[in-house]
Image (cartoon, rainbow, N blue to C red):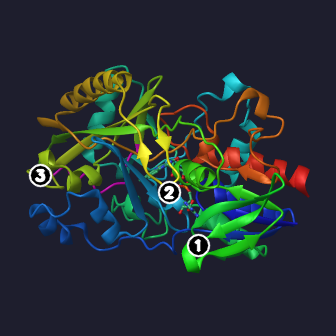
């Protein structure tokens, strides 16, 4: 039985691994190339920043080709990883179970969460290696009754060199990413083709028969019995729509907004981002220097990276957003999102002031990198683990399936969903 898996991020990698383990002949098609982390000293980019040359998000892709960005409205930028490993190669390594919206549809992923956590070594980052200001903010959050906790991480602290640059790729190999599952799949016989952007699904007599890669005279046809879309919350609906199939206008992104303050010599970059977090119903707060805002955001320009202190708000946003067949995205920050962000930012400021961080307190760039909700599962889909409108042989195994925004790390959720889907595929298609 031949299966094509599209994408190698949190969903695609574990699906390919599972299908290869179950004896499928797996072809993995990845739009990006092999991933290379940014290992130069960040100070080398500072002169460009001072000249204002790093203010366009598209410039990030010059330094790190895997960094793909889409501006979905005037004040919201969406980021994703387009390379082997997908967005997991840019992740902070946070590993938290995010389950919003699952109970409502009757989906219990406990077994899959347990299993994925067993495959990824998870631990907390030793407190003695937190920066002093990060510890102060933890104490301050605790005093405010916010109940902060160490963040479970997929980072081997013995290998970690505390460069603080997880989000531009881990150069020391300390942080897990889904390339490890891709390697497992390849060891089991799967074939990985990089630089192979899938454009369309081939559908014959209501059955997915393969995919078209590339366009024009360079397009190629790959045939299979099963197609598994795991191109992420933007890539998957884009392919569906380009193939004449629907996707839902329910894109959510978990909006990130970092409050920047100042503390001379805080050197917050000398630790992994987000070593602790506080959890409210729809957002978290977590220490985070936010290199994106450091380079992109003009209002942050007068503070050096050594003196910058950041506290992140990650908000579960309203599920409203459209992805088009050409990859364009429309997604606004709604008035409800804004009022929730305002409340969270007020809390963040209290934590920072309590820790001795000085102003000016300036908000960073609104951005989102948890892209989901465009092929949401409903109660009635759970038996099959796919929406009934998908043609036979066509499956989705990425964060698109998650019906609700999380305001929490989403790799575990994506992997658990994809593992459940891959098991279903093996059960019904083999
Ligand atoms: C900067 C950043 C930091 C993050 N940090 C964390 C964290 O610390 N912890 C956490 O839990 N989550 C984190 N996330 C979120 C997490 O990485 C994603 O939610 C998760 O990877 C989603 O998995 P996915 O499979 O849906 O998509 P992705 O991981 O994005 O994978 C999609 C894959 O499809 C490929 N693709 C896209 N289009 C096509 C096409 N047409 N043809 C072929 N291939 C295609 C992409 O190249 C990619 O490999 C972070 C995200 C970002 C952007």
Among the 4 quarters of the image, the one containing residue 140: top left
For the point 12% across and 68% down, which residue is it?
47
Using the image, tell me which numbered label, if any, was put on residue 196.
1
Q: Secondary structure at mark 2?
A: helix
Give residue 301's mark. 3
Q: Viewed as shown, does residue 231 lie left or right of 44?
A: right
Q: Position of residue 346 (x, y in %)?
A: 25, 24
For the point 26% across and 71% down, the residue is: 41
Real-space CA distance between mark 2 and mark 3, rounded to the nearest whole angstrom? 27 Å
Query: In this rendering, would 428 be left or right of 144?
Result: right
The prevailing secondary structure element of the residues shown in magenta is loop
Give x and y (percent) for residue 190.
75, 73
State whether label 2 is within 8 Å of ligand 1: yes
C-alpha distance separating marks 1 and 3: 38 Å
Image check: 139 left or right of 85? left
The residue tagged 2 is 87
């Amino acid at each position: 039985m031949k299966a094509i898996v599209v994408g190698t991020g949190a969903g695609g990698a574990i699906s390919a691994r599972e299908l290869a383990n179950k004896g499928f002949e797996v072809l993995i098609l990845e739009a990006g190339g092999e991933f290379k982390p940014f290992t130069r000293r960040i100070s080398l980019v500072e002169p460009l920043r001072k000249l204002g040359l790093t203010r366009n998000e598209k410039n990030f892709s010059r330094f790190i080709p895997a960094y793909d960005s889409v501006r979905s409205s005037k004040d919201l930028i969406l980021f994703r990883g387009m390379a082997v490993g997908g967005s997991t190669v840019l992740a902070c390594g946070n590993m938290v179970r995010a389950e919003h919206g699952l109970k409502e549809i009757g989906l219990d992923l406990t077994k899959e969460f347990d299993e994925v956590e067993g495959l990824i070594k998870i631990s907390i980052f030793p407190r003695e290696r937190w920066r002093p200001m990060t510890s102060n903010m933890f104490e301050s959050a605790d005093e405010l009754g916010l109940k902060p906790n160490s963040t479970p991480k997929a980072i081997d602290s013995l290998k970690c060199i505390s460069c603080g640059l997880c989000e531009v790729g881990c150069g020391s190999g300390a942080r897990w990413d889904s390339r490890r599952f891709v390697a497992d799949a390849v060891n089991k016989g799967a074939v990985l083709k990089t630089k192979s952007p899938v454009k369309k699904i081939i559908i014959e007599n209501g059955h997915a028969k393969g995919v078209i890669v590339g366009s024009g005279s360079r397009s190629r046809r790959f045939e299979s019995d099963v197609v598994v879309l795991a191109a992420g919350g933007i890539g998957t609906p884009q392919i569906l729509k380009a193939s004449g199939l629907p996707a839902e206008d329910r894109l959510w992104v978990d909006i990130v907004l970092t409050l920047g303050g100042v503390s001379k010599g805080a050197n917050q970059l000398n630790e992994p981002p987000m070593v602790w977090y506080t959890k409210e119903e729809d957002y978290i707060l977590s220490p985070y220097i936010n290199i994106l805002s450091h380079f992109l955001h003009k209002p942050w320009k007068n503070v050096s990276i050594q003196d910058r202190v950041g506290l992140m708000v990650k908000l579960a946003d309203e599920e409203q957003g459209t992805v088009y067949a050409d990859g364009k995205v429309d997604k606004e920050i709604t008035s409800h999102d804004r009022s929730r962000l305002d409340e969270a930012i007020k809390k963040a400021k209290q934590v920072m002031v309590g820790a001795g961080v000085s102003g000016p307190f300036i908000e960073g760039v609104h951005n989102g990198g948890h892209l989901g909700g465009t092929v949401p599962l409903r109660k009635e889909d759970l038996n099959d683990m796919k929406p009934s409108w998908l043609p036979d042989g066509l499956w989705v195994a990425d964060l698109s399936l998650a019906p609700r925004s999380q305001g929490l790390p989403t790799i575990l959720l994506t992997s658990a969903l994809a593992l459940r889907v891959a098991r279903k595929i093996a059960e019904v298609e083999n």
